[in-house]
Each structure stands twice: as C-alpha cells, then as structure tokens.
Amino acid sequence: MSISGKQAKGTSKIADRACRVTTKSYSNMPAKRQDFTIYTADGLRLTKANGPFATGLSPFNRAFPVDDPFGVRRAILPTLLRFPDGSMQGVGTAFHVDGWGTYITADHVVDVVRSHLGPDRVLPGTLHDADPNMPHIVLMTGVGVVFGTVTLEPDVFIAATKVTSIFEEYQDPLSFSNASRGRVAVDIASLSTQSTSRASSSISLRATRWIPELGEVVLAFGYPTLKVTERDRYVRTASISEELHGAYGRVLRIFPEGRGGHNRGPGFEVEADWPSGMSGGPVFNSAGEAVGLVSSSIAPDGDEPGVGYATWLHGIPELRMLTPRLHHENPGRRFGYAVLTFSPWRLHAIFPDEASATSWRNRTVASAEVVYGSHRIGTDEFMVT
C-alpha cells in the first residue's frame, strides 16, 4: 500500500447526510465569549485556567492570542517536523491527554512523515516508529514568559517515538488488481513520547456521551503563527516563533458519519476562524473538556465568518486504541498502577506499568502496596479496580 501527501484544507460542498440547520440562522445572532474553565493536570496537582482567555476586542469568532504561559500552554504544544540535519518546520498542534506522554493531533498534521516512508513501512494501525535518520515529529514544550529572544535547550523538544493512526481497508476503483489497500479512516492520530524533565501538563478528554447542540459555543486552541526561520545554514541555527491562539465558535452542523470524500470520520462544523497551524489543536466544550480537534477550515471572506471542521471524539470507537490508558467513561481519569499506603491513606505515586511502580516502591517506600485502578489525573483520588 502507499499513502502519502498532505491533506488539503477543506473546501468541498457539504455532504447531504449532514445534520443541517434549516430553521434558524445562528450567524446573525449575538454571541459572546463564555467563561470556559479548563483544568490542566501535572502529576498530583491541578491548575485552573479561567476564560474567556481573549485579549482585546477582536470579533467573537476570530482567532486571538492567548496569554496563559503556565496553564493551557503547558498542555497544548506546537508540533514540528525535524529533519536528520536538525532543521525543522512547523506543521500544527498537539495536546497531552494522559500525563504519561500520549498526545493527540490531526492525522494530516503528521502524514507529512508518512510521505517520506516507503510503502513497506506504512502499516495499518501503527504509522511508524520514529527514526532519527528520517524526518520525524517533535513537540516544543513551554519555556515560560519570554521577553525578546532566548536560546532553547535541546530538551525543549520532545520526539514522538511512535505515531498511531486509524486505518481502514478499501478497494481502489482505479486499480487493475483486486488487492485491498489501506487508507486513513479518521483525521486523528496519537503521538507516544518518552518521559522527560520537561513533560507537559495534560487536559481532560471527553471520549463518550457528548453530542454537540446546534448553536452551542465551543473553544479551539492552536498555533497559527508557528514559524521556523533559518538564521545561519552553515552552523544550523534557526529562529522559532510561536504564539498560542484561541477561537470561539458556534456549532452549525453535525456529521455523525463524516462529510464524504476524504472526510470520512465523524465531525461537526463550526462558525469560527481556525487558521492553518491550529490543525490538531483541541476543541473544548463549556465544561472544559476536549470533545474534538481542529481538522480543517475555510478562511473568513470579508464580512463572512470563517468555517471550521472538527473531528468529533464521541463517534470514534477506535479512540481507545489511540489512548489505551485513559478511562474513557470518566473524563480526566486514567488507568495505572499506584503505590499506596492504606492506613493512613496516601497515594505516593502512580505509573503506567506495574514494573515501574514496583521498582519505585522498592526503592522509596517498601511498606506500601502496588495496586491497579483508576486515577483522577492531577489529584490523589484513586479507585482500586
């Protein structure tokens, strides 16, 4: 099989099977930015980020810069393509979901890596294991408040060690053989990374039981101004500029079975300005849960608002494959191995695997027990299962 090339920005007509708004025009209704509250989790600590996040008086559905370097910026990261010679280019946005190095992004953000691989290295399910001798994806962690230009340490960039997408088999009508081929089924991918000293915070993901209502306000984040400029090609130095942006918008249409063509996954249409670079960024509901991710957009035209298309997490049964550690029925929770003392109760630490938990227990607090269960990320709340 051979799958390559960037997915184009969505400009096609809306499929007839969409859930349509036919009785009310939301674009002419007054709207305001809502005070969304988003929690980011870091270890056993929760950080509360209060909306409306916007600075200035930009129109309701236009993108605006977000001034929150120690909140959502630590969970929503710029995504770059790094080449074997060390040069990089910005490709989009990703966000951390489980506290153990699993990030979610749009598949078309990372398919540029697939275009550099031969057909024998493109397999259904797992996209690829990162190879430093091939172009690969890296995430840029937060560096706090920066005034002017600073030198970035190498550990600011976290390499994706594995990228996983959702593939499906199909018969190519233009093929002279009857052999089936693989293609991406939904515009979503997960990135696995190794733990580092700069591990980022995570946000709550709503994988089930959220159905968008027509006219509902959602909030997306991403990096439309991500830019890498080479400063000296002989010593390989470059300048990286990035600024997190947000954009409010109203749900206009719902596509439970996709929009047709290359847009096969479940999604919803939003009246919003989602510039290029926000692709892969999270889309939040008013409860502060990531319910979708930015997939594609049509830019505003004069006084006409832009249109954004989001991948809808609720309608993706394979999401469990991409985020196997999350407790999908309970947003903000994950399954793992806790090092616990029962009397008095104390959660000392939690790990994704039993071996790591046992090793830490033996070195640190031998009297504690290692048990499996569901942990609310950012707290000491743990349920033994």
Image (tube, helix red, strand yellow):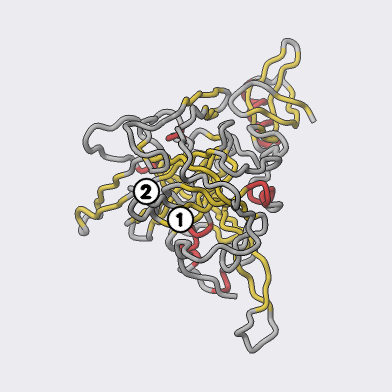
Q: How many other residues sit within 10 Å of disc 2, few (<14), some (14-19) or many (≥20)? A: many
Residue 24 in sight in this render: yes
Tag 2's secondary structure? loop
Q: Nearer the viewer, residue 154 or 116?
A: 116
Q: Who's the residue at 57% across and 54% down the image?
A: 188
Q: Position of residue 230 (x, y in %)?
A: 24, 55
Which amino acid lies under the numbered mark 1 shown in the image of this protein? Ser
Residue 244 drawn at (x, y percent): 38, 40
Which residue matches tag 2?
224
- The residues bearing labels 2 and 1 have C-alpha atoms spaced at a distance of 12 Å
The answer to whether residue 175 is left or right of residue 148 is right
The first of marks 2 and 1 along the sequence is: 2
Viewport quadrant of the N terminus: bottom right
In the drawing, does residue 316 fall left or right of residue 46? right
* Residue 297 numbered mark, or none: 1
**The one of 261 and 217 positioned closer to us in this rendering:** 217
Which mark is drawn over residue 18? none
Question: Circle 1: is it few (<14), some (14-19), or many (20+) Cα within 10 Å?
Answer: many
The answer to whether any part of residue 266 appears in the image is no
Residue 284: x and y in percent read 54, 38
- As shown in the figure, which amino acid type bears the numbered disc 2? Pro
